[in-house]
Image (spheres, grey):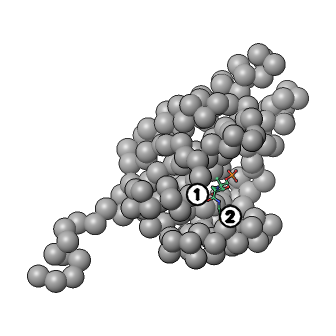
């Protein structure tokens, strides 16, 4: 036998990378849609040693694991270094990214082209649900810091964690 049948079933994998400080409903929308398109979806949480976040990496991972548990095919891992190396080590051929607005496109296109040039990995852009087109982790943190209501923008578990962290000052 020749062709794909001879190699057994192929597991289709993709990665959703980001800082996730913290995960928002916008991220979750993209991850859930990717989880319906692929057999296994990795959520890769970037470790950026030069930028201290509101949440530690382990806290971000823990929140993402809990809010994605229902999908059943999502794995959450930290990474540092190049995303293409994360992909290579796990045989992931595709990166899935949400595009909120045209303003996201310039930089995302550059990264997609660079990543493809480095290792051949493909990037698939998913249009964000318009409900979340203005949403970012930074804005959520800013609004929550000043007492604004972000309950419609993050999962309840994240809302609770945000409240606790901000009360700690
Ligand atoms: O949530 P963010 O901060 O917008 O995510 C950015 C992220 C993590 C997707 C991007 O910075 C990234 O892929 N960093 C890994 C380092 C890397 O591979 N850089 C080259 C990209 S062309």
Quadrant the N terminus occupies: bottom left
Mark closer to the observer (2, 1): 1
Residue 38 in the image: above or below residue 153? below
The dot on residue 155 is none
Q: Name the residue under label 1.
A: 82
Residue at image x 48%, y 43%?
76
Quadrant hosting residue 2: bottom left
Residue 157 image position (x, y, % from top left): 59, 28
Residue at image x 55%, y 46%?
79
Residue 166 image position (x, y, % from top left): 78, 22
Quadrant the C terminus occupies: top right
Q: What element carries label 1?
A: loop
Residue 90 in the image: above or below residue 3? above
Q: Mark 2 points at which residue?
A: 99
Residue 129 image position (x, y, % from top left): 65, 58
Camera-side residue: 32 or 111? 111
Quadrant hosting residue 58: top right
131 sits left or right of 95 in the view: right
Residue 121 in the image: above or below residue 19? below
Q: Distance between the residues labelled 2 and 1?
A: 21 Å
Q: Is residue 73 visible?
A: yes
């Amino acid at each position: 036998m020749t062709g794909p049948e001879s190699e057994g079933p192929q597991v289709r994998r993709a990665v959703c990378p980001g800082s996730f400080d913290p995960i928002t409903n916008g991220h979750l929308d993209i991850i859930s849609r990717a989880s319906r398109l692929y057999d296994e979806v990795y959520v890769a949480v970037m470790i950026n040693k030069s930028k201290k976040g509101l949440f530690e990496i382990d806290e971000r991972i823990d929140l993402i694991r809990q809010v994605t548990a229902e999908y059943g095919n999502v794995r959450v891992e930290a990474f540092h270094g190049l995303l293409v190396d994360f992909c290579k080590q796990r045989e992931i051929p595709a990166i899935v990214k949400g595009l909120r607005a045209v303003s996201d496109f310039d930089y995302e296109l550059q990264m997609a082209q660079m990543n493809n040039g480095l290792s051949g990995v493909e990037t698939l852009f998913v249009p964000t649900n318009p409900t979340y087109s203005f949403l970012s982790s930074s804005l959520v943190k800013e609004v929550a810091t000043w007492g604004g209501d972000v309950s419609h923008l993050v999962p309840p578990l994240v809302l609770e964690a945000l409240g606790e962290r901000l009360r700690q000052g």
